[in-house]
Each structure stands twice: as C-alpha cells, then as structure tokens.
Amino acid sequence: MFDERLKTGPVLALAPMQEVTDGAFWTLVHQYGGADVYWTEYFRVHSSSTPETRIIHAINTNTTGRPVIAQMIGNDPAELARTAKFLQQLPIAAIDLNLGCPAPIVYRKCAGGGLLREPERIDAILGALRDAVRIKLTVKTRLGFASADEFDRLLAVFAKHSLDALTVHARTVAQRYRLPVHYDRIRQAVQTMNCPVIANGHVYSAEQAEALLAETGARGLMIGRGAIRSPWLFTQIRQRLRGEAVRHPTGRDVGGYIRALWDTQASFATAEKTHCDRMKKFLNYLGEGVPGPFLQQVRRSQTAAEFERICRDFLDHDRPMPLLPAELTHELVSA
C-alpha cells in the first residue's frame, strides 16, 4: 500500500516525534481520518542496543490498518545494519534512517541531524543498509547542519544508494523549528532524486498543503506538529485535493479531542500532576491554535480538575476553529 501511494501520490504521513507519536496516538489520530502511513519513534542504535520493546509493541499492535515504517537513529554502519535485519522480521513497510533530529543530546553524539556534518559517514551507513535491507529503504533528512547550502552535497550522497523515498524537512538542524522553511530545496530534491520525495516542515492547513505540493512537486507530505494541533488536518487536505469544502472542528470538537488525548496517556502516569505534565507535550502544539491565554493557563495547570476547567472556559462553543499555528493566529486576530 505504501508503495502504491508513493507511485500515485500524494501520500500523507504522520511524522515521527519522540515520546509523542506513539502507537496510542496513531490509534487516536486515525479516528479523525488519519495518515496513509505511520513512522515509528526512532529506535536508538549503538553497540549494546536492543530495539525498544514499546516501539515494537506499537508496530505489532497497530490498529490503523495502514503501513508502518520503522525509523532508526545511530551512527555505526554495522550496528544499524544489525538492527535493520531484526526489524525486517516485524510487520513494517520500510526501514528509515533519521538524519534530522535537532536535539542537542542527539546531534552531539553524531546521530540524527549531527550526521549531516559527516557526509562520508552517511555514505558508509547507507551502503551498509542498502546491503542489509530487503524491503523499502528510506531516509528522513534536514537540509544540512548549519546551512541549507550543505544540501547539494548531501543529495549527491543520497542519489548513490537507490533509496525508495526521501523525506526532506526543509530546515537546517541549527534552525530547529524556526522559520523560514526552504521549500525551494524540496523542489531541488524532486528534480535531483530518482525516488519519490516527501515534503516536511510547517504544514499547517489544507490550502497551504495543496500549494506546497504544487510548488515542490513532492509526492507527499509528512506532518508532525500540525497533526498534533489538528488531527483533522489529514482529512482536510484530502477534502481540499478533491475540491470539496474543508470542514473545521468546533470548540467542542477540539475539547473532545483533548479528552481523548488525556485517556490515551493514562497508562504513562499515575500521579495527577505527572499526567498533566505529559499532556502539555501535546497541548504545547494544539494550544497555539486556540486564541487567548489558553496555552499559558494550561501550562500552569497541576490537576485534572484545573485542566478540565481551562478547556471548558475556552472550548465550550460551536464556533469553527481553523487551529492555525501561533504566528498565523495572531495575524488573523489583529487583522
């Protein structure tokens, strides 16, 4: 199915976000329409690593009926090949190499986005993986570590290894999640690579997604923070691409989503404050799309009752909510 969607496009993918887009979140987001394909959180790979059981469990208990791609992060070619051989025994559609994580704790170990400073090592890793992987092999990358100009050299490395897809997050590691997003570099990848290219980075609405596909020529979109903010986004993009009216959720719809999120996270924490703190991982994204001091109040909440009261104060209404990111929400409010 993943292969078919890549050929026909556009494929809509849920981005991997560590400790956020787990199996429980796949199940939840799928109830709102969901993605065409789900990326796992990354498996950490090093000399003494064993694949994380909770991610294996998410793969084996995937309830979405959609393909899953197993992502790895590490810097040792032999160890990555060893782990890839194991992962191929699981019900997955592809193996993906993470070359984009911008967390300092990761890139300082020359993993994730840190590998972009060493194209020769990436070349060796992809060579080892291409020999070890019998299913689809994909890469998720940023444009470079410090400069988007590094992308030219990286593309030359990627082109050597017969990748089955390349996902391009069109920012550098140094940018983290700041603007601008260099979508012209995604277009460059489309024109350079012999495999499908998936666009990633600041996809926030159906209208913008349609324009991004047209601008870049990408075969699909990978969405992370935008899908956490609005799990309706995948369905809205499909509506837009079919020429249908795009439906926005009401405040009560958003409140229902937050309650469902709360339930999915119940197994992670028994203490009420800890549960609230875990929810803030999600509400930091969703709250950007709620006008007023909603997010500031949520961040200060310590109990379930307080959390529920804040949601009720801001979301107990039937007005449609576009759930746009903060900078766009501010523009609309001030216009």
Image (cartoon, grey):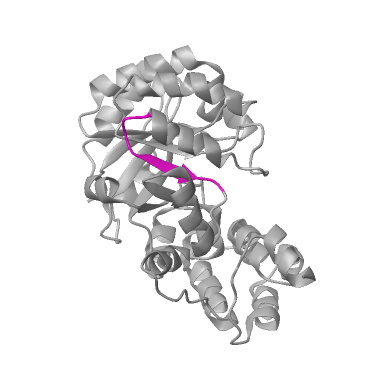
Q: Is residue 262 above or below residue 9?
A: below
As drawn, the residue found furthest toward the right would be 334
Residue 103 in view, yes or no: yes
Name the residue at 23% across, 42% down.
90
Rendered image quadrant of residue 63: bottom left
- Say which of 145 and 82 sits in front: 145
Q: Quadrant of the C terminus?
A: bottom right
The answer to whether residue 37 is magenta is no
Residue 303, x across and y down, in percent: 68, 71
- Residue 59: x and y, percent? 31, 49
Residue at 59% x, 24% y: name it: 149
**Camera-nearest residue between 113 and 6:** 6
Q: Is residue 292 above or below residue 168?
A: below
The answer to which of 246 and 53 lies nearer the viewer is: 246
- Image x and y of residue 38, in percent: 36, 51
Taking the image as shown, residue 254 lies to the left or right of residue 71, namely right
| Residue 214: % across, % down | 45, 51
For this view, does 150 lie left or right of residue 121? right
Does residue 223 appear in the picture of this structure?
Answer: no
At 46% from the left edge and 53% from the top edge, which residue is drawn? 21
Displayed quadrant of residue 131: top left
Please tell me which residue lies in front, 38 or 86: 38
Q: Which residues are magenta?
A: 193-201
Q: Is residue 320 left or right of residue 51?
A: right
Where 191 sits versus 273, above or below? Answer: above
Q: How many marks?
A: 0
